[in-house]
Image (cartoon, rainbow, N blue to C red):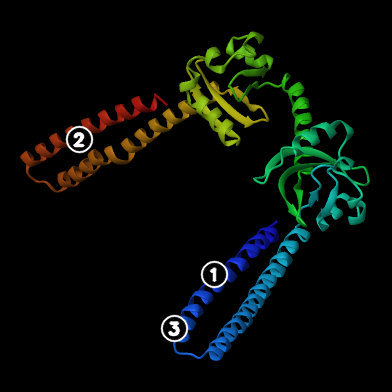
Amino acid sequence: MQSFFKLKSGRFAIPIIYMIFGIAWILASDRVLTSMELNAEGHLFTLLNSAKGITYVFVTALLLGMLISKFEHNLVSSERQYRNMYLSNPYPIWFLEPESFKFISVNDAACFYYGYSRKEFLDMTIFDIHQDQEISAVKHFFSKSNDAGYEFGKWSHLKKNGEQIYVNISSLLTILDEKPAIMVFVIDITENVVFEQDLVRSQINLESTLSSISDSYFTVNRDWEITSANSNFYERTGTTAEVIGKSVKSVFPDAQESVIFQAGTRAMEERLPTKIEAYYGKLKKWLHVACYPTQDGIAVYFTDITDRKEREAEIIRQNEQLKKVSWLNSHEIRKPVASIISLVELLKTSTDSVESAQIIERMQKCTSELDNLLHEINKEASKI
C-alpha cells in the first residue's frame, strides 16, 4: 500500500516537474531569440531556433531520465522495505480478495502458525479456517473493512491439523498490485482465552466450596449489585438471600462512606487484591476484609476480628501502663532517694543540733514524697 501511494505521487511529480521546466524553457528561450531576431540573418536565426529545440529535447530527456531513475530507486527501496516488514513480521498477516475472500498473499508467520504452505493458502478462502457457524458473521464483519482500519475482536480459527486457536483480528482496506484488497492482521490470544476459561471453571468450583467456609463471602458486579453470598454472610449481616440483585448502597446505606467500601472500590478500579482491617459501625464489629477482582466485579471475604482487636487494644493499654510505671521507677523515685542519701551523709557529719534537726525534717519530707510515689506506682501497676 505504501508503494502504491509513492507510485501515485511519482506519477504526478514527474509530469509537473517536466511541465514547469518546459514552460520556463520556452518563455526564456523565446525571449532570447526574439531579442536576437532583430540583428540576426535568416539562416542564422533558423539555426538558433533548431539549436533551441535540440537543446530542449536533450535537457528534458536528461531530466526525465534522472527523475525516473530516482523514482524507480525510491520505489524499489520502499517496496523492498515494505515487503520485508510484511513477510518477516512475527505475526500472521494476509491479504484477501474483497469479493470472494480468497487469500491472495500470506506472510511466513501465517504459514508457520496455521501449518499450511503458501501454495495451499492461495487455494483457500478465509472461510476454510473458520467454523461453519461463523461464516455469516465473518462476511458481515469483513464487509465493514475500510482504509481507516477495523477491529474485529476475538475469533476462533482452525489450523491445518484441526487444532482450534483464538485470535484477535483487525483489517484494513488497501491496494495490492493495483487491485483492492483486505489486509488482515492476526494476534494469537489462545493462551489468554484458555486461561480465562480455566479461571471461570475454577471460580465455579470455588463458589461451591465457599458456601462451606467460615469466612463471610459475597460478590458484587461492576454496578455494585450483590450477585452471590454464603450463609455466613447472611448470618453476620442479619440479611437473607433477598439481597441478591440489590445494590450494596441500598443494603448497607452507610457503607459508601466507610474505608471498607473504599478498599472495594480500589480493587474494582485497579483490578488488584486489596486487604484492610476496619471497624464497621453497623455491625459494631472489627472486620478483616479482603477484596479480589473477578471477571464481573469483585469478591469480598470478611472475618470478625473483634476479639483479637480488643486483645490487641488491651495489650497496648497495658504496655502504656508499664511505660508509666517504668518511668516512675526510673525517674521520679530517683529524686527523693538521692535527696535522702545526701541528707544522711550530711547528718553523719553534722555536730550542730539545730542543723541536725533541719536535716531530719528534710529527710522526713523526702521520705513522705517517696511514700507517695510508691503509692502511685502501686496504683498504676494495679491497672495493668
Left or right of residue 188, residue 242 in this image:
left
Q: Position of residue 28 (x, y in %)?
A: 48, 78
What's the amino acid at mark 3?
Ser
**Residue annotated with mark 2:** 366
Q: Position of residue 13 (x, y in %)?
A: 60, 65
Mark found first going from the N terminus, 3 or 1: 1
- 2 or 3: mark nearer the eye: 3
Q: Quadrant of residue 334?
A: top left
* Distance between mark 2 and mark 3 Cα atoms: 133 Å
- 1 or 2: mark nearer the eye: 1
**Residue annotated with mark 1:** 20
Decide: few, some or many residues near mark 3? Use Cα within 10 Å; few <14, some 14-19, many ≥20: few
Disc assigned to residue 35: 3
User: Total label count?
Assistant: 3
What's the amino acid at mark 1?
Ile
- Mark 1 secondary-structure assignment: helix
In the rendered image, the vertical position of residue 356 relative to residue 234, given as above or below: below
- 3 or 1: mark nearer the eye: 3
Mark found first going from the N terminus, 2 or 3: 3
The quarter of the picture where the C terminus appears is top left
Disc assigned to residue 222: none
What's the amino acid at mark 2?
Cys
Left or right of residue 228, residue 351 in this image:
left
Left or right of residue 100, residue 183 in this image:
left
- Name which residue lies at 73% across and 67% down: 80
Residue that extends furthest to the front in the rendered view of this protein: 42
* Distance between mark 3 and mark 1 Cα atoms: 23 Å
Q: Quadrant of residue 6?
A: bottom right
- Name which residue lies at 69% across and 66% down: 78
Q: Nearer the viewer, residue 96 or 210?
A: 96
In the rendered image, the vertical position of residue 102 relative to residue 86, given as above or below: above
